[in-house]
Amino acid sequence: MAGIKKQNGPQQIHSRFYADGQEWKPCLVVMRKMFGNGNKRFMTAQSVQTGELYLNSQGRPMPWKAIPFSSIPPVESNE
């Protein structure tokens, strides 16, 4: 029989990530290193609405843990 037979352990509630009035999801970025040879891989954020990466003031992708997220969705005004 198909389906869930039982659930082991407590269930995890995954919150959404909001910043700058948009919802963001994790994204892996592979970039050339600034100094030295090779590539650098790190997690950053990608907008759910537009697909753009979350960039810092220098125009480079910002690491996931350095982004100030909020779990409260932005308020949409219809003016």
Image: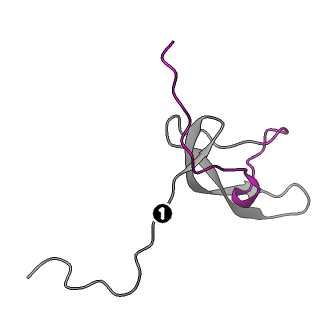
Sort mark 1 into few (<14), some (14-19) or many (20+) by Cα contacts within 10 Å: few
Q: Residue at x 68, y 43 (%)?
A: 54
Q: How many marks?
A: 1
Q: Residue at x 58, y 51 (%)?
A: 71
Residue 71 forms part of the magenta stretch:
yes
Which of the 4 image quadrants contains residue 18? top right
Taking the image as shown, residue 24 lies to the left or right of residue 32, namely left
User: In x, y percent, where is residue 38?
Assistant: 79, 64
- Vertically, is 54 above or below 67? above
Q: Nearer the viewer, residue 41 or 5?
A: 5
Residue 70 forms part of the magenta stretch:
yes
Q: Main secondary structure of the magenta part?
A: loop
Q: Residue at x 75, y 50 (%)?
A: 62
Going by the picture, which residue comes out furthest to the left?
1
Going by the picture, which residue comes out furthest to the right?
35
Identify the magenta region.
Answer: 56-79
Q: Which residue is mark 1?
A: 14
Taking the image as shown, residue 31 lies to the left or right of residue 6, namely right
Q: SS at mark 1? A: loop
